[in-house]
Each structure stands twice: as structure tokens, then as C-alpha cells.
Image: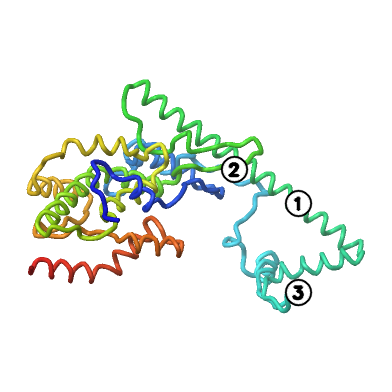
Amino acid sequence: MPRKQEPALSAQAKAAANAGGTERAIEFSKDILDAIRSDVFLGGQGNRTSAGQFNKGTSGNPRGRPKRESPGAVIPLANLDPDSVSAITMRHAARKVTAQTEDGAVEMSLKEAAIIKMVREAIKGNTGHSRTLFQLLGRAEADGIKRKRDEFRHWSEVRDHARETYAQAKQAGTKPPLSVHPDDIELRADGSVVILGPTEAGAIAVMRYLHSKVDYHIINITYYRWVEHRFIRRYRRRFGDGFLYSELDFWADQSELPPRLQLTLDDVAELFKPYAGMSGRALHALLREAAEPLELPVPPRELRAPIVVPTSDIEAGREKGIIGRPFLDAWLTAANTFWSQRAAEIKGQ
């Protein structure tokens, strides 16, 4: 079936580039709050100058001066005397050994092998091993509960901080920063935490970058549609059955944004309106302006054929479980030589 030209990005193109949901489970990190406070909650500016120095009046340690360790504080393994009994014990506990299990000979740490041996002896009725095993299990469960409680408290603090940031922006009548959003942190009744959007500094930087590419994408799609229209008018045929690469590229970026920032088809239709009826020369000039600060590629003015991803390639990618951004990157790499040759052939016609 020939591809239809639509005023807005097609729902099929959106579905073809969709990489799935963004919900994910998280692992607790003690350093995340510092990273968020020093970079994310400051609107991406951080508390350092462009030269990497701390701004005047700001601290390099948001938590302040660390408290002096108590006599019972745990000393990191790296700081232990290598000849101490503790260091020697830890080194040997981590040493790899080969142990016989129900699955045959398996390589594991000496620590794991000792626990497996203890479980076997406890099953046989050895009271000493049973007592030690239950002590270890109780300690492990207590540590797990503490970790879960600390994690819940940590993300509760992060969410409260995000709420305060957005409330201050709303009160001041300003646009809130693209940072941690309180709706992206779900605290469940069972004490678990689910992250629905970016919370770490690196992920938020990616979110900001993808969000800043919207204007580039819209102009890029409009320009490629103009190229496609010129191709159809000149050669009296379509380039092929599929979707414009520029459309799929846009929806792949959108799928990586949190749901609250993803654009709908109606939103995109409104964004296209300012560029309706513009000439290819004007669109190409706007595309250069939008691409330059983002260091993104701009097709040459001599381009005479649109870049179309065949429907058959998309379906083949789905069968292999490759969709969204991974599919587009792989397809573009594999098809790069083909499109270069094809463009040269068309240019010579």
C-alpha cells in the first residue's frame, strides 16, 4: 500500500518508533541526592563555574562538613591494613573456589560455598549450623528492611524537594526547570519505590537535550516532506512504501521522554503550522539555524530523494525485538551505503 502524506506525524509512524514504557525499578544510591541538589535542582547550572570552580558562596559538599566517625564506625575495606586479620579474612572470603552443587561443579566465592555448606548441614539436623544459619538470616532480613526504609526515606525527601521547586516556580509565575518531577517518583504503600521519569543528573541531561530538539525535528520533517513532494512531482512516483526517517527519528526521541513531556499528534500538528507553505530554500535555512547549536546534521540542498525506512525493514526489526532508537541506529548504519548510491543514481537521472 503506498504511503500517504498527512498534515501531522502519523500514528503509525509513532507506533513504529515507540520504544516502550519508561517505568523502571531503581537501586538505592547514597550519592544520588548530592548529584540532584548540586546539578538538577539548580536548573542544570550546578554550583560550579564554567572553569569547574565552585561559585562564590557555595559549597562543594552540600551535606556540609562530615561528622567525625564514632569508634564503632565501619572502616572501608580500602582503608584497612592489608596485613590485618579483617583484610585477610575479606580477601579469602571473596576468593573463587569450585564447589559441587546439584548442577555439578560451579565456581563461586568461598563465602558463598561456606553458606551452601552450612545450609546442607542444617538440613541434615546439625543444630550448631542451624543456629548460625538463622542468625545470618535474621541479620540479612534486618539489613534488607533497613535498606528499604532508607531508600523510601531518601526518595520521599527527593520528591518533597521537587514539589517545593515546582511550587516556587508556579508562585513566581515562571516556567519550572526540566528536572526531577514529583509525579515521576511513586512511593507505594508496601514501602517500594518506582521511578517513572529521570531522576539522576545524567538522565536529566539527556531529557533536556531531547526536549531541546523538538524545533529541529519539526523543521527537519517539514523539509524532508518538501523533498518528498518534489520527488513525487518530478518522477511521478513515490520513493517507496514506508515512513520518513525524520518522522521515526522524532518519535524515537519522544518515546525516551517522560510521559508528561511527550507530544500528542494534535500538539505536533500545531507545531507544523508556522512552516506550512514555506519554500525548500527557507526551510533549509531554518534547519541550519536549529541544527547548529545542537550540532546535528543538515541534509545538503542538493538532496533529491527522501530517506524512507521501508515497512518491511520495520516489520523485520520487530520480529527480532529491535524497535525504537536501537532499530533506527542499526538501520541507518546498514543503509548508509545504499542511500548514498541511490541518491547518486537519482541525481544522475
Q: Is residue 101 above or below residue 213?
A: below
x and y percentages locating residue 63 in the rendered image: 49, 39
The three-letter amino acid code for the residue at tag 3 is Thr
Q: Which mark is residue 139?
A: 1
Q: Nearer the viewer, mark 3 or mark 1?
A: 3
Residue farthest to the top, as pictured: 171
Q: Check disc 3 and report the residue beneath it.
A: 101
Q: Residues within 10 Å of mark 2 (few under 14, many from 20)?
A: many
Q: Residues within 10 Å of mark 3 (few under 14, many from 20)?
A: few
Q: Check disc 2 and report the residue beneath it.
A: 151
Q: Nearer the viewer, mark 3 or mark 2?
A: 3
Q: Residues within 10 Å of mark 1 (few under 14, many from 20)?
A: few
Q: Earlier in the sequence, mark 1 or mark 2?
A: 1
x and y percentages locating residue 170 in the rendered image: 37, 23
Q: Quadrant of the N terminus?
A: bottom left
x and y percentages locating residue 117 in the rendered image: 80, 69
Front residue (pair 131, 21) = 21
x and y percentages locating residue 171 in the rendered image: 37, 20
The three-letter amino acid code for the residue at tag 2 is Glu
Q: Secondary structure at mark 2?
A: helix
* Identity of the residue drawn at 35% across and 34% down: 177
Q: Secondary structure at mark 1?
A: helix
The three-letter amino acid code for the residue at tag 1 is Arg
Q: Nearer the viewer, mark 1 or mark 2?
A: 2
Report if the CB atoms under discs 1 and 2 are less than 8 Å apart: no
Q: CA distance from mark 3 to mark 1?
A: 25 Å
Q: CA distance from mark 1 to mark 2?
A: 18 Å
Q: Is residue 214 above or below residue 322?
A: above
Q: Quadrant of the C terminus?
A: bottom left
